[in-house]
Amino acid sequence: MVRAALLTAPGRPLELVEIDLPAPGPGQVRVKLAAAGVCHSDLSLATGLLRAATPVVLGHEGSGTVTAVGEGVTSVRPGDAVVLNWAPACGSCHLCSLGEPWLCENSAGASTEPYAALADGTGVHPGLGVAAFAEETLVAERALIPLPDGVPLAAAALLGCAVLTGYGAVHNAARVRAGESVVVLGLGGVGLAVLQAARIAGAGPIVAVDVTPEKEELARRHGATDFLLSDERTAKGVRQLTGGHGADHAFECAGRASTIRTAWSATRRGGRTTVVGIGGKEDLVSFSALEVFYFARTLSACVYGNSDPVKDVPVLAEHVRAGRLDLESLITDRITLDEIPAAFDRMAAGRGGRSLVVF
């Protein structure tokens, strides 16, 4: 039996329960969690903004140690340190064949079937396929990435979502070049990772935008050269900081129509607006046909940093070892399983960076 934070229905409080986690079957691996990051996607699943089969153990950003492997598993063995991959590509669908594994048509399959059970036999689903809000989890072999040497195991959890998404948004999706200007709207864990990635890319100026003034110090620590409080003058403020043009690249990390609109308006003519945040289906963004033509901006989404985790995690590990990427500074709160609801509250209020459940 394993302790886990269980969501029984959208909008209900998380419950600390014990679940019966079976031994790994063919192609499966059992992992003892070292840490799990609390991501905004977990909050969206808990509130029902995003759908999940219930009851469900949420958590998709995690790291840990392999304790057992099933028949046919060859890439990891007991004792190996690993990072969870919540969107493992199948490698054979149409989108994988196009070289876009982050859009894999089959990556979400694991979340649709129970992976464990409650004491009364009720099936429990794994949130986003990996169920990291538990002492141990059971996943498919392809949902694991061996952790390269030189990266602290607990902090490595952030590589599984926030850092991979933020770094990928800058280097894979937008392909920011040295000397280009960047504005980042929304400074949660992903937004802070975008700031670090922009600094690594040699961007400048790097403007950070948030609704919370307390985020300024945190933003500058992660690479921001300037900070603006979000209001109706944000786009004008960005233009003033970028020679009157607007930013070459704007990254929206809040997942709101109003913030997407502001990011678009803060982008220079011919620049690129990259939407990283996940919003609601009823939250609509509007543009006039004339402005779309006149400004010639590119508006695009970024899914999981447009990343191939198998290839990109070793790159991130090298940045960590070289001191260019600081995982520890992204973590503002270290918590236990029963403190996840408080972490959701901080996130909803826009306070802090990443909360990390440490087991």
Image: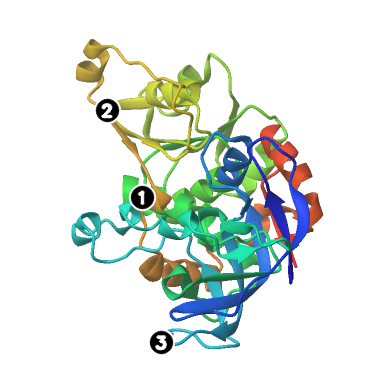
Where is residue 281 shown, x and y percent of the image? 44, 27
Residue 307: image tag: none
Q: How much space separates mark 1 and mark 3, taking CA atoms?
A: 45 Å
Quadrant of the image occupied by residue 98: bottom left
Classify 10 Å Cα crowding around label 3: few (below 14), some (14-19), many (20 and above): few
| Residue mark closest to the camera, 1 vs 3 | 3
Where is residue 126 shown, x and y percent of the image? 56, 58
Q: What's the residue type where badge 2 is placed?
A: Arg
Q: What's the residue type where badge 3 is placed?
A: Gly
Please report whichever mark, 2 or 3, sits nearer to the chain's N-terminal start. Answer: 3
Tell me which residue sits at (36%, 53%) in the image.
Answer: 171
Please report whichever mark, 2 or 1, sits nearer to the chain's N-terminal start. Answer: 1
Q: In the rendered image of this protein, does residue 224 appear above or below residue 103?
A: above
The answer to whether residue 92 is left or right of residue 209 is left
| Residue mark closest to the camera, 2 vs 1 | 2
Classify 10 Å Cα crowding around label 2: few (below 14), some (14-19), many (20 and above): many
Residue 297: image tag: 2
Residue at image mark 1: 178
The N terminus lies in quadrant: bottom right
Classify 10 Å Cα crowding around label 1: few (below 14), some (14-19), many (20 and above): few
